[in-house]
Every structure is written in structure tokens, then in C-alpha cells.
DNA sequence: TGGAAAGGCTAATGCTCAGTAGCCTTGATA
DNA sequence: TATCAAGGCTACTGAGCATTAGCCTTTCCA
């Protein structure tokens, strides 16, 4: 099942309280990590006691898994939407990177937790998340490979170039702040441009953007 | 006190067993995280019981702090050594990035833990580590600023360019494997070249390296 | 109006963990 | 050879944690 197929299926519905709990857990997991977050704290964040959480959630582990699976699926969706109908491989790469980076600013907590807490998942959940992550990586590598095959891109290593592009997104999720002095668009456009220079597309002006 | 000043001071000596414990703890912290690692496991990794660790170490927290402080200091040293006596700002940037990336391959576990476990430190230790990290970031930003001031570099944002360069290193620490199909030198040289194109240095041939 | 479902609560359970107490062995030294 | 420090060990302590049990109130519909 591909990411875009998954998008066509209904994602599980949540009650408002269920949503609130998931959001509170997300913030806490991002702040102090899954292991260091207690059910008492998650409960307190939505105004109830720890044990009451279990009227809405089956376990702390499932809460983490649900957050991570959802964010991976959404990332696939965003990618699919960004490159749909774009034929030029350089355009496709730029769009993919822009979508990737924008996602990591807009949903930085989820992306952050999604990257960092993989090892806190139990085996079954980890396999599911790692599977989605690999398939996302493959989408990127596929674009780079296609560009190389068409002699539009020139890279020392397809793998290295793809990793570098993906790593930039993770970095963004780690340091981006909405009230910081770098705007979302600034980061997105700059990284989109950077992606093209990284893969050696000829004729990208300004490399890292116009001086400013 | 700067990173290079710190290098001049004697770093605390450790007994062989102390070293072994630190190494075992490092591996476990990297693998499953600080919170999820027990003193029993650290002990078992060096052939003793958990409580016996306390003949060599004052606490699990201190073990983490010692690992993180040492790696930050070493990173400063490596940087200082790499750029010492290099006058051309583009050369300096390339050398700094190469040293940064090489460090993140050679000492990936420490670098990985150093980045990921900051939130597991108590307040005092965290402040010390964050302080060293900021000063390291400033060194990078300083090089980029200098290149921009000299009109050698052309970037949309000094901060963004510096963050991107540092983030690539962290990415390497996350996925690099000695037995993988990307060699240390390959990554180092490619990323050194990436760095120059990222800051818009004119005349960098091949951008992301020769096709291969 | 009555009864059940939803969703709170407190108390309890059972487990795990970091760290301490106190004991024992070994090996070097005086 | 007597002593002492180093460095193991087991048993214990005290705390914290996820989760369950069981109870109570509110709300909503038959």
C-alpha cells in the first residue's frame, strides 16, 4: 500500500477530547521525550487525572504510535500533492523539497517526535513507522535517480544527495520557531533552491538565494 | 572560556574501567536513550552488577554529562585545528565543514547522544552543554559572516546557511555506518563541496561532485 | 422517569528503577 | 604477616510509574 493509497482510506475519527489528549501528548513528548512524560502530566494538560485518560486511549504506547503513524501518512500525502502532475524532474525535486521543508515548519512537533521517538515504539509499531519512512525516502531517491538518468542532475552519490535533502528537513523541525526571525517562506524557498544546486542542476541563479 | 582554551586544560583522567563504563553507557544511550537505559544494563555491559558501577561513577546523570561535555570540547578542538592558519575564508569554511562532518562519522555515537539527549540533562549540566553548543554554532556563523562581508559568499540568510551546514552533520551522525556503502571520505568531500555551493561561492566545479 | 452509557474520580496493584548499606575477597604494602 | 584500600556482591529502600478496579455523577433517550 502506498502513501497516496492510504490517503484514500478514512483515517480514524477522534472525539474532541481524544484530539486534545493527542495534542497534549504531542507537546509533552516533544518537550521532554516519551519516556520522561507521565500519564499524569498528559492528563493534567487536558484537565483530568492520569487514569481518566484510559477512557479515551488504550495505552501511552498507542498514543505515541497514533501520533507517529498519522504524521508519516500526512507527509506522504503532502508529497504526493506537491509533485502531482509536475513533469519536469527539476521542478519535481524543488516541489518535493519545498513541501518537505514546509511540512517540517508547519508541523514541527509531530515531525520532531516522528524522528526522535522511533526507538520508544514497540516492535510492531516501529516496523510500521519505519516502513512508512523508508517508502518516503524512496520517493525522494527516485526523483534524484530520474534526474541523474536524464542527465539533468549530476551527483557524486544519489543516496548521499537524498539523505542530505531529508536531513535538512529534520534540522528545520529541530530549530524552527514560528516567532523566530526566519520566515517559513524564506526557509522553504531557500532550501528549494539549495536542493537544485545540490544535485547540480545547471542554471540555478544565486545558489543560496539573493544576498540580504 | 573558549573551546580552544578548554583544550589547553587537562581533561579529567579516567581509570580503564571508568573508560569502559563510559563507552558502554555511550553505546546504550545511543541505542535506546538515556531514560530507557538502566544501570543494570550498563553494568552488565562491562561484566559487573548495577550497584558496583557506583564505585566508579557518582551517578547515571554524571555519566551522561561527562560524555556530552567531552564530545563538545573535542568538537571545538577539531574545529580549531582544522581552520588554524587558513586565511582564505572559502578554504576555512570548507575545512570547518569537512572537520565537522568527519567528526560526526568518526564519533557518531557521541555526536548522536550529544544532540539528542540534551533534554535528559539536569539544569546545570544542560546549561554547560548548551553553552558549548552555542559557541560552536557561533564559530560557523562567524565564518559565513566573514565571507559575506568580503563579498565572497552570497546567502539569503547567514543564520539559515549556518544552520543548514550544521544540520547536515547531525544527519550524518544519525545514518552513517562504518560498513555502509558511503565512505567517510566520500561524505566528507561531498559535503565540503556542498558547503561552498550553499554559500554561493563562485567557481565551485561540479556542484555536488562528479557524477558517479 | 428510569436506566444505561460516558466519563470523571480515588485507591490499589505490581513493577521497575537509581542509589545506599553493609559485607566479603583480593592484592599490595608496611 | 597484618592491615587497608579497591572493588566486587547481595539485600534493601524509597520513589515513581502505567494501568486496573470499582465507584459516582451527569446526561440523554426510551
Image: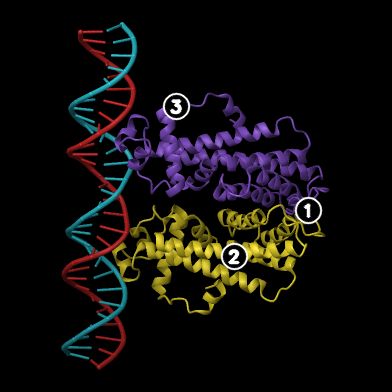
Chain colours: A purple, B yellow, C red, D cyan
Q: Chain of mark 1?
A: B
The residue at 31%/38% (across/down) is: A50
Q: What residue is shown at x 58% (from left), y 24% (from top)?
A: A8
The reply to whether the C-beta atoms of the residues labelled 1 and 3 are less than 8 Å apart is no
Using a 10 Å C-alpha cutoff, classify the residue at mark 1 as few (fewer than 14 neighbours), some (14 to 19) or many (20 or more): some
Could you confirm whether marks 1 and 2 are on the same chain? yes
Q: In front: mark 2 or mark 3?
A: 3
Do labels 1 and 2 touch, CB within 8 Å? no
Q: Which residue is found at the position 69% from the left and 50% from the top?
A: A161
Could you say which is closer to the camera, residue A198 or residue C23? A198
Instruction: Give the structural element (helix, strand or loop) at label 3.
Output: loop
Residue A107 placed where, x, y %?
55, 40
Front in this rendered view, residue C25 or B66: B66
Q: Is residue B151 left or right of residue A17?
A: right
Which residue is labeled 1 in the image? B211
Up-down relation of residue A68 to residue B187 (above or below)? above
The residue pinned by badge 2 equals: B103
Q: Which residue is mark 3?
A: A14
Which is nearer the N-term, disc 1 or disc 2? Answer: 2
| Quarter occupied by the N terminus of chain A | top right
Residue A121: x and y in percent read: 44, 43
- Could you tell me how far apart the alpha carbons at marks 2 and 3 are, in whole angstroms? 45 Å
Q: Residues within 10 Å of mark 3 (few under 14, many from 20)?
A: few
Q: Which of B162/D16 is in front? A: B162
Instruction: Label 2, secondary structure: give it.
Output: helix
Amino acid at each position: 500500500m502506498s502513501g497516496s493509497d492510504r490517503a484514500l482510506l478514512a483515517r480514524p475519527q477522534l472525539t474532541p477530547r481524544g484530539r486534545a489528549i493527542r495534542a497534549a501528548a504531542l507537546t509533552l513528548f516533544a518537550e521532554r521525550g516519551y519516556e520522561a512524560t507521565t500519564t499524569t502530566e498528559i492528563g493534567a494538560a487536558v484537565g483530568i487525572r492520569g487514569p481518566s485518560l484510559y477512557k479515551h486511549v488504550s495505552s501511552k504506547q498507542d498514543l505515541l504510535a497514533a501520533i507517529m503513524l498519522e504524521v508519516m501518512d500526512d507527509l506522504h500525502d503532502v508529497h504526493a500533492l506537491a509533485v502531482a502532475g509536475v513533469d519536469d524532474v527539476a521542478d519535481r525535486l524543488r516541489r518535493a523539497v519545498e513541501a518537505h521543508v514546509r511540512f517540517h515548519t508547519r508541523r514541527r512537533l509531530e515531525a520532531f517526535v516522528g524522528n526522535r521517538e522511533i526507538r520508544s515504539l514497540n516492535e510492531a509499531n516501529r516496523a510500521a513507522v519505519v516502513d512508512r519512512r523508508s517508502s518516503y525516502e524512496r520517493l525522494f531517491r527516485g526523483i534524484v535517480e530520474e534526474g541523474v538518468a536524464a542527465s539533468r542532475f549530476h551527483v557524486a552519490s544519489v543516496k548521499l544527495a537524498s539523505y542530505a535533502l531529508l536531513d535538512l528537513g529534520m534540522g528545520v523541525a529541530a530549530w524552527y520557531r514560528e516567532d523566530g526571525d526566519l520566515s517559513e517562506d524564506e526557509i522553504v524557498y531557500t532550501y528549494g533552491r539549495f536542493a537544485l544546486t545540490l544535485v547540480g542542476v545547471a542554471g540555478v541563479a544565486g545558489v543560496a538565494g539573493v544576498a540580504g
